[in-house]
């Protein structure tokens, strides 16, 4: 069931989203050669704690997961696409890092992700990240009253296709509210004019995941969480929580 949020709820979700935006900004600021993924998780934990927020990631255990998620961020490096579990790995020159973070504040959730490089970037990584950002921006621009989910997915997918990037089949965004994952599923592909109609108060996490390899094939690490490209190509993941309003799309997860 899809729940439309009131203006009061959107204001509360903006505060939860702000914590997420602040946490991601702090993590990106701290990320450097030699810093470990566990240290980045600590940075995010500090931001959430200071804001009085909890983590919807920590202890999260969907049906596919063999163990509860042990951190407040997902940290996916290079060929890891999403759901990377932070560990003692220390960032190296040229790494492509995707950080996903959530927060719960006053019962409302926010969810966002950002990709960036550490040290000297490979030009192809910079281009991949820029494409993922453009795909997210295209999805946000399509999150307007009168459009349908198919329009949004088409907008995201068109950017990926134009760059000959791959996407993970079946993976995409989601509705969000009091729970991190709510209806509807938000595909990163779509047919214009088809699917669920976008209405004021609909809040969606829009999250393109692009792989440099055009096929988008992936496998799961033995940890049961980390999704990695099978061809070893690098991936980028960008996400915002976005409200559909009469005044246009409203990004709720900016710092
Ligand atoms: Mg996320
Ligand atoms: Mg999400």
Image (cartoon, rainbow, N blue to C red):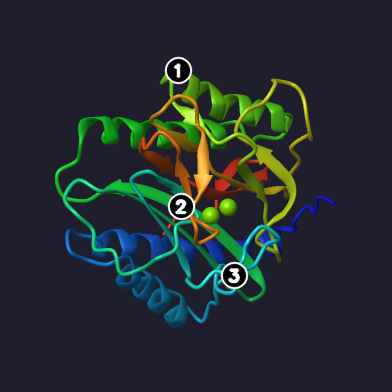
Q: Give how far apart the Cα atoms at labels 2 and 1 are.
A: 22 Å
Circle 3 SS class: loop
Q: Position of residue 245 (x, y in %)?
A: 67, 44
Mark 3 lies on residue: 67
Residue furthest to the front = 222
Q: Residue at x 21, y 51 (%)?
A: 118
- Identify the image quadrant of residue 73: bottom left
Is the residue marked 2 within 8 Å of ligand 1, measured from its CB? yes
- Reading the chain from its start, which is encountered first: label 2 or label 3? 3
Q: Nearer the viewer, mark 2 or mark 3?
A: 3
Q: Earlier in the sequence, mark 3 or mark 1?
A: 3
Task: Indicate which disc residue 162 carries.
Answer: 1
Q: Earlier in the sequence, mark 2 or mark 1?
A: 2
Task: List x then y, in percent, for residue 194.
Answer: 77, 24
| Disc sitting over residue 113 in the figure | 2
In-front residue for pair 110/209 = 209
């Amino acid at each position: 069931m899809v729940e439309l949020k009131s203006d009061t709820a959107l204001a509360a979700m903006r505060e939860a989203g702000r914590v997420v935006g602040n946490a991601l900004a702090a993590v990106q600021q701290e990320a450097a050669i030699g810093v470990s993924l566990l240290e980045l998780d600590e940075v995010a934990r500090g931001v959430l704690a200071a804001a009085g927020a909890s983590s919807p990631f920590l202890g999260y255990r969907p049906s596919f997961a063999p163990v509860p998620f042990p951190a407040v961020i997902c940290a996916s490096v290079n060929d890891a696409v999403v759901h990377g579990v932070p560990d003692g790995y220390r960032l190296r020159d040229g790494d492509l890092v995707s950080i996903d973070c959530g927060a719960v504040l006053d019962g409302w959730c926010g969810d966002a992700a950002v990709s960036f490089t550490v040290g000297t970037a490979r030009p192809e990584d910079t281009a991949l990240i820029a494409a993922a950002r453009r795909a997210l921006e295209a999805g946000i621009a399509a999150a307007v009253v009168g459009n349908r989910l198919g329009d949004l997915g088409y907008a995201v997918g068109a950017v990926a296709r134009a760059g000959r990037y791959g996407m993970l089949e079946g993976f995409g965004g989601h509705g969000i509210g009091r729970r991190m994952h709510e209806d509807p599923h938000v595909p990163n592909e779509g047919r214009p004019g088809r699917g669920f109609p976008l209405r004021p108060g609909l809040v969606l996490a829009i999250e393109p995941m692009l792989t440099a390899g055009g096929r988008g094939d992936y496998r799961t690490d033995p940890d049961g969480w980390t999704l990695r490209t099978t061809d070893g190509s690098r991936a980028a993941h960008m996400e915002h929580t976005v409200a559909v309003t009469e005044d246009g799309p409203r990004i709720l997860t900016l710092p």
